[in-house]
């Protein structure tokens, strides 16, 4: 596959928002609004209690269902937890793992996230694996080291045949939500190149070229076009704007038009600068 013809994704992470009624309305509005054009894969990740409800609205549409978390055991005495089998039973295709809110607010370690990643793959789920540095880490020039650690430890022991089912989401913690900070297209592009290069060192260039890397952090209709046109950005993981159907649909449309242009200019085979050795 040509590096710039990777599958594109726009995925909504509803986090801990919506009531049952709101979740149903939002899902219906998204299904109606995104239509059937399927160049861009679309998914929504509602809270656990509404997966079944939303899962009944999506069939027949181009919108897939994802979960925001799982517990890394098949079943057992784990009060309050949700297993990969349960997610599959509810029709989930994707699961978000390693989100910074779980890393930093709920204390999830790289080792625990790694266990989740391996069990999710073993169950047959597609994993959206989130990585990203905090503001302090960026200011201390630790971005590369942090991303390196999260990738190496989070993906340790993942079998090669699972890797085509992996999506990485680069979500700099400092740009998520209403922090007032926004990542520039250049910062996003640089981080994505770094992630792809590191992944290539672990798993080989070919898999790195086909690896889908999303950006997440205050993606809105007005900045989606410029972020989604960046080299090596294959889509977006969206929080706040995924709770408003019109905004989410506008981002799907921004992605669709950004990638039309990319497809047209990708007819000539080229080398992939993202995978070139880093100049020191
Ligand atoms: P926002 O789009 O609200 O910044 O959230 C990004 C995110 O954390 C998606 O997982």
Image (cartoon, rainbow, N blue to C red):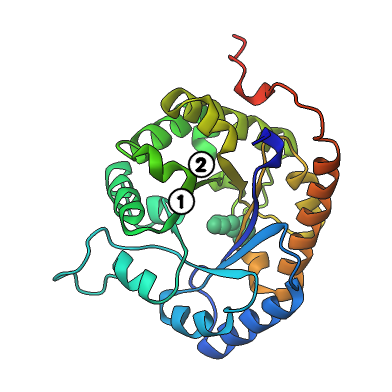
Q: Residue at x 40, y 45 (%)?
A: 162
Give the image location of residue 76, x and y in percent. Answer: 15, 69
Give me the disc on residue 100.
Answer: 1
**Can residue 142 be seen by looking at this rendering?**
no
Asked if the residues shown at circle 2 and circle 1 are in contact, with their CB atoms under 8 angstroms apart, the answer is: yes
Please state if 23 lies on the left or on the right of 95 as rendered.
right
Specify whether tag 1 is near ligand 1 (CB below 8 Å). Answer: yes
Q: Residue at x 40, y 51 (%)?
A: 104
SS of the residue under disc 2: loop
Please state if 134 lies on the left or on the right of 37 as rendered.
left
Q: Residue at x 45, y 32 (%)?
A: 146
SS of the residue under disc 1: helix
Name the quarter showing ligand 1.
bottom right
Q: CA distance from mark 2 to mark 1?
A: 7 Å
Please state if 236 lies on the left or on the right of 197 as rendered.
right
Q: Residue at x 54, y 29 (%)?
A: 206
Q: Extreme left residue here?
A: 77
| Comes first in the chain, label 2 or label 1 | 1
Give me the disc on residue 132.
Answer: 2
- Res. 196 image quadrant: top right
């Amino acid at each position: 596959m040509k590096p710039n013809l990777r599958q594109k994704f726009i995925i909504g992470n509803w986090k801990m928002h919506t009531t049952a009624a709101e979740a149903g309305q939002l899902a219906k509005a998204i299904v109606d609004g995104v239509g059937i054009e399927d160049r861009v894969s679309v998914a929504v990740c509602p809270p656990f209690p509404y997966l079944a409800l939303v899962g009944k609205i999506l069939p027949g549409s181009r919108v897939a269902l994802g979960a925001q978390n799982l517990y890394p055991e098949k079943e057992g005495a784990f009060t309050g937890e949700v297993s990969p089998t349960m997610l599959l039973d509810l029709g989930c295709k994707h699961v978000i793992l390693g989100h910074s809110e779980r890393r930093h607010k709920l204390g999830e370690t790289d080792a625990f996230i790694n266990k989740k990643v391996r069990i999710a793959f073993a169950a047959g789920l597609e994993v959206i694996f989130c990585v990203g540095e905090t503001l302090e880490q960026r200011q201390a020039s630790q971005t590369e080291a942090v991303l390196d650690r999260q990738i190496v430890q989070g993906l340790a022991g993942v079998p090669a045949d699972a890797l085509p089912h992996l999506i990485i989401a680069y979500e700099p913690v400092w740009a998520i939500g209403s922090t007032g900070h926004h990542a520039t297209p250049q910062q996003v592009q640089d981080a994505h190149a770094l992630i792809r290069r590191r992944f290539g060192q672990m798993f080989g260039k070919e898999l790195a070229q086909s690896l889908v890397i999303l950006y997440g952090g205050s993606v809105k209709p007005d900045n989606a076009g410029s972020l989604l046109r960046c080299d090596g950005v294959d889509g977006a993981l969206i929080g706040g704007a995924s709770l408003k159907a019109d905004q989410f649909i506008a981002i799907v449309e921004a992605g669709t038009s950004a990638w039309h242009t990319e497809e047209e200019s990708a007819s000539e085979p080229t080398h992939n600068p993202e995978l070139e050795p880093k100049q020191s």
